Amino acid sequence: MTTALMNANNSEFFQQEVLSNLQRIEIEFPLPPPTLPLVDFSNFKLEVRDDDVFNSSYPSPSLSELQCELSRLKKLPFIFRIFRRPRIVYLQQEIDTMLSCIQQLQTNLSNLKKLVTTNSRLATLEKMLENTDSLNKYELAFIEKRIAHHRDEIYISTAKAVIKRETLRKHICAALEKASDDIFEIAKIITPLLIGLVSSGIVQMNLTPLLVAAIAFAVSRIGVASLCIEDTKNK
């Protein structure tokens, strides 16, 4: 049994995780205004600097600058280091936090690249992480945000493909027969359904809260009536 399924046994916790992911996804991918066309992001280029993240009022030293300052303070005579101990401790904590963040970002990016073989945005993020010494904590936060956004995009694309499977679609449509297109109502109905289908082996997938949230999001955006139109005709 996979870790995801073991966690799924605690259905209340699993459903809370689904709803938590769903709240983020709904905010991150809002419906476009009806008067505006959908934006094509196929040629989207990620800028290294973003005004929302890199504001001039938030100066932040790079990792190498922090390391240089820490090294300088550690070379001071003992009596001088005593008075600078709070600063030394702070610098060490900042450096450790940034190094841990870089390692996690590299792991997350590597996992994403296993899901999609070629993607210009992932390549841009990878290039940004090449010279880690020059990055500051706001740049790391920006990269983290973009990786999370792209991960959600991939899961939503996966969800759209998953719900087209006939067996899964029929089960979802039967459960949502009297449901509206409300995203959270859909999530609460399909979460126990999917846990049951995967646990019993009827449907094969690596079930995670993020995938369930993405499926609920995809069903809501497509519309229950549109998704289940074939099943409705066959009744």
Image: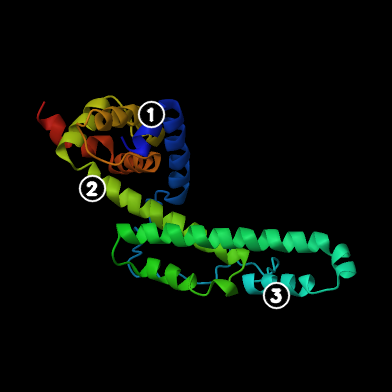
> Which x, y percent locates residue 129?
49, 69
Viewer-closest of 76 and 46: 76
Whether residue 15 is situated above or below residue 61 in the rendered picture: above
Circle 1 crowding by C-alpha within 10 Å: few under 14, some 14–19, many from 20:
some
User: What is the spatial separation of the Cα atoms under label 3 and label 1, in whole angstroms?
Assistant: 52 Å
Of the two numbered discs 3 and 1 in the rendering, the one whose residue sits closer to the viewer: 3
User: What residue do we see at 86% from left, 73% from top?
Assistant: 77
Q: Earlier in the sequence, mark 2 or mark 1?
A: 2
User: Does the rendering let one see residue 131?
Assistant: yes
Query: Which image quarter: residue 73?
Result: bottom right
User: What is the spatial separation of the Cα atoms under label 2 and label 3, in whole angstroms?
Assistant: 50 Å
Hey, what amino acid is under mark 1? Lys
The residue at which mark 2 appears reads as 161
Q: Are the residues tagged 2 and 3 within 8 Å (C-beta)?
A: no
Q: Earlier in the sequence, mark 2 or mark 3?
A: 3
Label 3: state its secondary structure: helix
The residue at which mark 3 appears reads as 68
Whether residue 42 is situated above or below residue 170 in the rendered picture: below
Viewer-closest of 158 and 104: 104
> Which x, y percent locates residue 1?
31, 34
> Which x, y percent locates residue 41?
36, 64
Outermost front residue: 78
Q: Earlier in the sequence, mark 3 or mark 1?
A: 3
User: Does the rendering let one see residue 141?
Assistant: no
Query: Which image quarter: residue 19?
Result: top left
Q: Is residue 215 left or right of residue 16?
A: left
User: What residue do we see at 67% from left, 61% from top?
Assistant: 94
User: What is the spatial separation of the Cα atoms under label 2 and label 1, in whole angstroms?
Assistant: 21 Å
Hey, what amino acid is under mark 2? Ala
The residue at which mark 1 appears reads as 188
> Which x, y percent locates residue 213?
38, 40
